[in-house]
Image: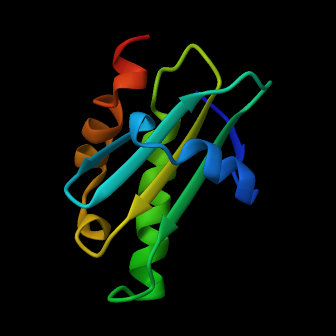
Amino acid sequence: MLSFTALNISQHFKNLKKDENAINVGGLKVYIKINNLETSRLGINISSNGTNAVNRNKFKRRIKEAVRGLEIKHNVDIYVIGSIQSSKMNLKDINKILKSHPELTNK
């Protein structure tokens, strides 16, 4: 089981947000990049337009649960951007999308 710290510094997001690190499926955009740190980091973002606080928090909990279940050998930075459409995804769909990221399938 992985433990994550917060990905919360602007420069870290800028370094991670490149097209070669991203997949976009069903309104869910996932950036993953291997880092050289002692821990993995996770950042989650979902717009407040069209979703209420309850749905945003449920989405964040589902993302965290899906990320905890990943089997990763290296420490990574993961940044997930949700939309109104993706906020309604269930855990199984989110797991499938995360596991399909090239950074995780090639390792």
How many circles with numbers are drawn on the protein?
A: 0
Q: Kindly identify the residue that appears in the image at 49 percent across and 63 percent down.
A: 60
- Vertically, is 25 above or below 36? below
Q: Kindly identify the residue that appears in the image at 43 percent across and 69 percent down.
A: 58
Residue 44 in the image: state x and y as whole percent. Answer: 54, 59
Q: Kindly identify the residue that appears in the image at 72 percent across and 59 percent down.
A: 10
Residue 23 in the image: state x and y as whole percent. Answer: 32, 42
Please state which of residues 89 and 23 is positioned toward the viewer in this rendering.
23
- Vertically, is 23 above or below 40? below
Q: Quadrant of residue 89?
A: bottom left
Describe the colour scheme in one phrase.
rainbow
Q: Kindly identify the residue that appears in the image at 34 percent across and 31 percent down.
A: 101
Residue 29 in the image: state x and y as whole percent. Answer: 36, 53
Q: Quadrant of residue 9?
A: bottom right
Let me know if residue 8 appears in the view: no
Q: Quadrant of the C terminus?
A: top left
Q: Quadrant of the N terminus?
A: top right
Which residue reaches farthest right? 38
Please state which of residues 14 and 83 is positioned toward the viewer in this rendering.
14
Please state which of residues 20 and 98 is positioned toward the viewer in this rendering.
20
Let me know if residue 66 appears in the view: yes
